[in-house]
Image (spheres, grey):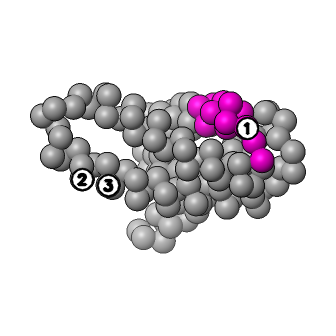
Amino acid sequence: MYTMFLILVTVAFFVSSAIFTLVVKLFKVQNLSYKKSLIILFSFGLIGIIVEFIANFVFLFLYRFVNVSLFKFLLILALFFPFHYLLKKYYQTAWKKSLGIYFVFEIIMNVLVFLLSHSQIPILGVMYMF
């Protein structure tokens, strides 16, 4: 069971890296490479896990004062900054281009996760992790 999960997570990571590479290519970024996309997504995934863990811990104490939708929106906005830093470091992109890549990639991944999670193979919802 754990082996299948690890295989699915690995496949999901490589597929999301390929999608990310295509999105970055859409924005005509120079020096595009699949290896850099892997590094960016892996680093962003680790940063995202840490930021979301801290944010959810903070939200436990602020849930009476802050709307959940507003909190999630602020979290998405806060995650843009490390994403932009990584894109700027590896691809030398401006913040407007980084913002476009960020939102297009997130929209594509969320649609893909929605479609896979509502398919006949529910275990493919593991793509949501990336």
- Image quadrant of residue 107? top right
- Where is mark 1, residue-wise? 94
Front-lying residue, 125 or 27: 27
The image shows residue 116 at horizontal and vertical percentages of: 51, 39
Of the numbered discs 3 and 1, the one sitting upstream in the chain is: 3
Secondary structure beneath disc 3?
A: helix
Q: Is residue 76 left or right of residue 90?
A: left
Q: Which residues are magenta?
A: 92-105
Magenta run includes residue 62:
no
Quarter of the image with the N terminus is bottom left
How far apart are labels 2 and 1 at the CA level?
32 Å
Q: Looking at the image, which residue is at 56% across and 54% down?
A: 44
Q: Are circles 3 and 2 on residues that touch, CB within 8 Å?
A: yes
Front-lying residue, 55 or 116: 55
Residue 112 in sight here: no
Secondary structure beneath disc 1?
A: loop
- Residue type of the residue flagged with mark 2: Phe
Structural crowding at the residue carrying mark 2, measured as other residues with C-alpha within 10 Å and reported as few (<14), some (14–19) or many (≥20): few
Secondary structure character of the magenta stretch overall: helix
Structural crowding at the residue carrying mark 1, measured as other residues with C-alpha within 10 Å and reported as few (<14), some (14–19) or many (≥20): few
- Image quadrant of residue 109? top right
Q: Is residue 97 left or right of residue 84?
A: right
Structural crowding at the residue carrying mark 3, measured as other residues with C-alpha within 10 Å and reported as few (<14), some (14–19) or many (≥20): few
- Residue type of the residue flagged with mark 1: Ala
State the mark number for residue 57. 2
* Label 2 vs label 1, nearer the camera: 1
- State the residue lying farthest toward the right: 31
Residue 24 in sight here: yes
Magenta run includes residue 98:
yes
